[in-house]
């Protein structure tokens, strides 16, 4: 139901257990006791080799829980990676998934849960003709190692289909992890560039949810608090890695995930996926680069909501929000380093406008509008 209607109906799905605070990853073993006997821990190569996830593994060992580890999840995980996770899970007779990592790790684990439960190919669960996803028989736990995607609380998993050069989204309320651990210690070694890109992603989740046509008092509540927390902590977190700022970013990102699970996103996310698929620009960076032009495009439809959002973010009065975002990108070191080719524009526009997020955007974008927004990324 849009903001224009009188009667609104919400479906409300959230994680059952959230453990938060410094050192909380050491609670993992206790949390899964009696729930999983032999989980598969899904993570990425760096987190594993650098020993960053060691406290999680030690906590499982202390609780007497055997486990297997899949540590090859790449960023923007592919369908092949998801299938490898399924194979490892089945080979080791696992009974639960613990995803310790950024959005890529959590999304890969969530997508693997679909294949483990319902079988088939991941492509079968995408689009209008998608196969139905059944309730999971296993428990899914998410321990985010970046503050950004909100995947620990959303029903979505975004996976790269390298053959078709598209990002596919698999979605079901059953993919919302049952257990979430928010530990700022896991974020202590995140490089500034990654912290900036993922942090901007979280900010944009909150902002797109806040102005969404499908927004409501419920999503606004989550989005408003997320904007406050992220506005307060993002620059400090990126520049210093400060633990309190990391905790605030984790909570802001979680709240932003709650918000957009209810309201969907908008034109920034619609147009950014093709940039990631065609040029390999990271999701958060592509979003951050598109945001100023999308705010300017939406201004006539969502001016008052943007003014409120600016206030929540801590933007000084009289400062234009799109200008402020441009300055924020500069402060965070986010800049356009890719050459967007004019001849690619028709494909980018076509792929971008296929996204369901176009409908949630406060102003409906036509092909020409999308093209104009992409053109802001091409130097004159
Ligand atoms: Fe995002």
Image (cartoon, grey):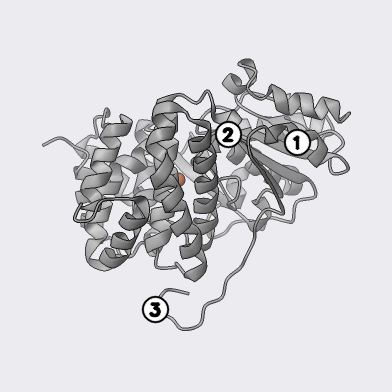
> Which residue has dot 2 on it?
184
Indicate if the residue with disc 3 has its beta carbon within 8 Å of ligand 1.
Answer: no
The residues bearing labels 1 and 2 have C-alpha atoms spaced at a distance of 14 Å
Corner quadrant of residue 94: top right
> Which residue has dot 1 on it?
27
Quadrant (top left/top right/bottom left/bottom right) for the C terminus: top left
Viewer-proximal residue among 133 and 74: 74
Q: Mark 1 or mark 3, which is nearer the start of the sequence?
A: 3
| Left or right: 330 as drawn, with respect to 234 | left
The disc at residue 4 is 3
The disc at residue 51 is none
User: Which residue is painted at 30% across and 64% down in the image?
Assistant: 364
- Front position among marks 3 and 2: 2
**Residue 106: x %, y % from top left:** 61, 39
Viewer-proximal residue among 100 and 331: 331
User: Which residue is painted at 83% across and 25% down in the image?
Assistant: 61
**Residue 113: x %, y % from top left:** 70, 43
- Residue 327, compared with residue 2, is above or below; it is above
Instruction: Look at the numbered disc 2 and give the secondary structure of its residue.
Output: helix
- Residue 224, compared with residue 235, is above or below; it is below
Ligand 1 location (quadrant):
top left
| Left or right: 209 as drawn, with respect to 125 | left
Q: Can the viewer see residue 221 in this picture?
A: yes
Q: Are marks 3 and 2 in contact (CB under 8 Å)?
A: no
**Residue 267: x %, y % from top left:** 34, 54
Q: Mark 2 or mark 3, which is nearer the start of the sequence?
A: 3
User: Which residue is painted at 41% across and 39% down in the image?
Assistant: 234
């Amino acid at each position: 139901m849009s903001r224009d209607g009188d009667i609104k109906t919400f479906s409300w799905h959230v994680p059952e257990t959230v453990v938060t605070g410094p050192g909380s990853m050491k609670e993992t073993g206790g949390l899964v006791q009696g729930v999983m006997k032999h989980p598969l821990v899904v993570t990425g190569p760096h987190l594993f080799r650098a020993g960053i996830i060691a406290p999680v593994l030690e906590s499982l060992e202390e609780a007497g829980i055997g486990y297997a580890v899949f540590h090859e999840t790449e960023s923007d995980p592919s369908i092949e990676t998801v299938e490898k996770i399924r194979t490892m899970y089945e080979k080791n007779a696992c009974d639960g998934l613990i995803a310790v990592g950024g959005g890529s790790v959590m999304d890969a684990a969530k997508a693997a849960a679909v294949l483990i439960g319902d079988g088939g190919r991941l492509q079968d669960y995408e689009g209008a003709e998608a196969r139905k996803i059944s309730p999971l028989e296993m428990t899914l736990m998410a321990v985010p190692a970046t503050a950004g995607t909100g995947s620990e609380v959303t029903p979505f998993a975004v996976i790269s289909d390298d053959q078709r050069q598209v990002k596919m989204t698999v979605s079901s309320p059953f993919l919302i992890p049952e257990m979430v651990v928010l530990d700022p210690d896991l974020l202590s070694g995140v490089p500034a560039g990654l912290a900036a890109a993922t942090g901007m992603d979280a900010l944009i989740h909150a902002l797109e949810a806040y102005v969404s046509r499908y927004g409501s008092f419920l999503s606004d509540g989550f989005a408003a608090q997320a904007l406050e927390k992220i506005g307060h902590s993002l620059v400090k977190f990126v520049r210093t890695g400060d633990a309190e700022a990391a905790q605030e970013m984790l909570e802001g990102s979680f709240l932003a995930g709650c918000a957009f699970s209810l309201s969907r996103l908008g034109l920034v996310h619609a147009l950014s996926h093709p940039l990631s698929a065609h040029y390999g620009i990271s999701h958060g960076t592509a979003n951050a680069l598109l945001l100023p032009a999308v705010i300017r495009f939406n201004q006539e439809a969502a001016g008052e909501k943007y003014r409120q959002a600016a206030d929540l973010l801590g933007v000084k009065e009289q400062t234009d929000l799109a200008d402020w975002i441009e300055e924020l990108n500069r402060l965070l070191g986010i800049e356009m380093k890719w050459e967007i080719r004019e001849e690619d524009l028709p494909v980018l526009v076509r792929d971008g406008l296929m996204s369901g997020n176009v409908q949630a955007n406060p102003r409906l974008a036509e092909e020409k509008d999308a093209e104009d927004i992409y053109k802001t990324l091409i130097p004159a």
